Amino acid sequence: MWFTILFAMCLQTSFLTPPVGFALFYIKGVAPPEIKVTDIYKGVIPFIIIQLVALAIVFLVPEIATWLPSVAYD
């Protein structure tokens, strides 16, 4: 369970980072023409940092990821 949640968090982060960055391309598609891709990249940096910090916390404290399933299915 813990590894699956870590994997899902990594996938979520990959949607915001190049070269994959699917979410960035979606945002570029709906943004006005004067918005550059570099502006979008700069805008998602804080969110990437937050996701990496959360990933590190879940990695170091696995009980965060396994608490709710243990309560729900116990």
Image (cartoon, rainbow, N blue to C red):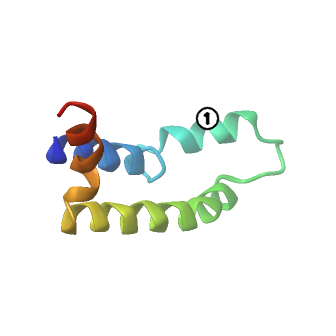
Classify the position of the N terminus by image quarter: top left
Q: Quadrant of residue 29?
A: top right
* Neighbour tally class for label 1: few under 14, some 14-19, many 20 plus, Cα within 10 Å: few
**What residue appears at the point 21 percent right and 48 percent down from the top-left corner?**
66
Image position, residue 6 (x, y; %): 24, 50
Q: Is residue 3 left or right of residue 45?
A: left
The disc labelled 1 sits on which kind of residue? Answer: Tyr
Rendered position, 20 above or below 74: below
Q: Quadrant of residue 12?
A: top left
**Disc 1 designates what residue?**
26
Image position, residue 42 (x, y; %): 62, 65
Image position, residue 51 (x, y; %): 43, 60
Classify the position of the C terminus by image quarter: top left
**What residue appears at the point 27 percent right and 60 percent down from the top-left corner?**
58
Q: Quadrant of residue 24?
A: top right
**What residue appears at the point 74 percent right and 34 percent down from the top-left corner?**
30
Label 1 secondary element: helix
Q: How many marks?
A: 1
Image position, residue 27 (x, y; %): 66, 40
* Residue 19 visible (yes or no): no
* Residue 55 visible (yes or no): yes
Q: Is residue 17 left or right of residue 3?
A: right
Rendered position, 13 above or below 48: above
Q: Nearer the viewer, residue 71 or 5?
A: 71
Q: Is residue 47 left or right of residue 56?
A: right
**What residue appears at the point 23 percent right and 45 percent down from the top-left corner?**
7
